Amino acid sequence: MADIKITLVKSTNSANKNHCATVQALGLKKIGQFVVLKDTQAIRGMVRKVAHLVTCEEV
């Protein structure tokens, strides 16, 4: 399994509270912060849900 790098690029201030919770569950707090997570179905679904707030690239 590969890893993916997820970076928060937009603020969650005006976002839906479900989207804010998803971003927090991914481990992101500040704009520009990134996390490297395992590429699983669950993580891909979370990234797809907040795709307008984050960028994703394979590591």
Image (spheres, grey):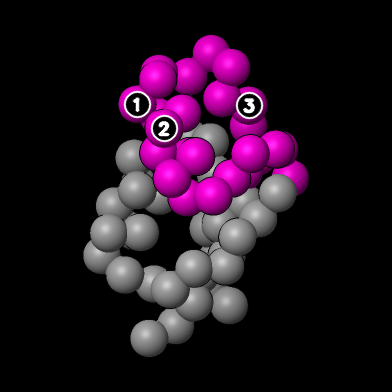
20 with respect to 41 (left or right): right
Relative to 17, say whether 58 is above or below: below
Q: How far across and how far down the image is residue 1, in percent?
A: 38, 86
> Can residue 40 be seen in this snapshot?
yes
Mark closer to the observer (3, 2): 2
4 horizontally vs 28: left or right: left
The kind of residue tagged 2 is Ala
Q: Residue at x 48, y 19 (%)?
A: 15
Local crowd size for mark 1, using a 10 Å CA cut-off: few (<14), some (14–19), many (≥20): few
Say left or right for 25 vs 13: left
Question: Within the image, what quadrant is residue 35 found in?
Answer: bottom right
Magenta span of residues: 8-32
Q: Which residue is mark 3?
A: 11
C-alpha separation, residue under disc 3 versus residue under disc 1: 14 Å
Write down the residue under mark 1: 18
Q: Circles 2 and 1: CB distance less than 8 Å?
A: yes
Q: Which residue is mark 2?
A: 21
Quarter the C terminus occupies: bottom right
Q: First in sequence, mark 3 or 1: give its number.
A: 3
Q: Residue at x 71, y 38 (%)?
A: 31
